[in-house]
Amino acid sequence: KQEVTQIPAALSVPEGENLVLNCSFTDSAIYNLQWFRQDPGKGLTSLLLIQSSQREQTSGRLNASLDKSSGRSTLYIAASQPGDSATYLCAVPVVGFQKLVFGTGTRLLVSP
Amino acid sequence: DVKVTQSSRYLVKRTGEKVFLECVQDMDHENMFWYRQDPGLGLRLIYFSYDVKMKEKGDIPEGYSVSREKKERFSLILESASTNQTSMYLCASSDAGGAWYGYTFGSGTRLTVV
């Protein structure tokens, strides 16, 4: 059974810092891995999708990497801003089924 | 961009009422999903559908049913709402298997049952 864990559970940083969020999964047979952002009381916004054949994906100040063999993904946020404050979730689809397995989430607070 | 639209942001219903949550996607996706999200429990899959009139139970289907009469619309039904169904409900869609383009979520419906 696929299990997805995120570390740290919460993170508080001053504006401008570069930071790394971690995601670990137990079953390396994945199609892809997706990072989401969730603002309080809102839905999930897709940030990055990494296919199993890729090593990384970039979008603006965000960079996500994937190491299937070690069961890890990282989300790197450069030059953090207060607007980056949110909960970040990683998720992988269950092979052979249609559902996503979500990580436990990292709650990020960026202070001005 | 794919858009997944949930018809209500906030709903307040009484215990015992029949409740309909509606979700529409505009990119011809085969798959649609309903999740609920609760503090400390994360996101849990209620039901999903991989085609019109097809449905599969997720992890917590008890107390819910679904309807998919058209490809773009997926409805979640609470047959007799109870207070333990107070939650955030999230709809999502994906192409077949979600393998290439990922999943897209709606903005959520916060349901309160009193």
Image: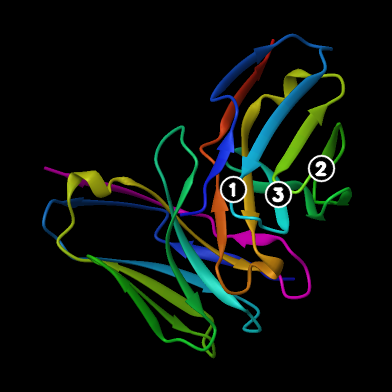
Residue in the picture at 38% in, 81% down:
A56
Residue in the picture at 86% in, 50% down:
B55
Q: Is residue B107 left or right of residue A107?
A: right
Q: Is residue A104 left or right of residue A14?
A: right
Q: x, y (%) of residue A49?
A: 47, 70
> Which numbered disc, 3 or 2, marks the residue that appears first in the sequence?
3
- Depicted B95 relative to depicted B80: above or below: below
Would you call the spot at circle 1 few (<14 residues within 10 Å), some (14-19), or many (20 or more)?
some
Residue in the picture at 31% in, 73% down:
A58
Viewer can see residue B39: no
User: Label 3, on which residue?
Assistant: B33
The disc at residue B26 is 1
Q: CA distance from mark 2 to mark 1?
A: 14 Å
Q: Which residues are magenta?
A: A94-112
* Residue type (three-letter) at the residue carrying disc 3: Phe
- Name the chain under label 1: B
Q: CA distance from mark 3 to mark 2?
A: 11 Å
User: Label 2, on which residue?
Assistant: B68
Q: x, y (%) of residue A37?
A: 41, 51
Q: Is residue A101 magenta?
A: yes
Q: Is residue B77 magenta?
A: no
Q: In what quadrant of the picture does the C terminus of chain B appear? A: top right
Label 1 residue SS: loop
> Which numbered disc, 2 or 1, marks the residue that appears first in the sequence?
1
- Name the chain under label 2: B
Q: In what quadrant of the picture does the N terminus of chain B appear? A: bottom left
Label 2 residue SS: strand
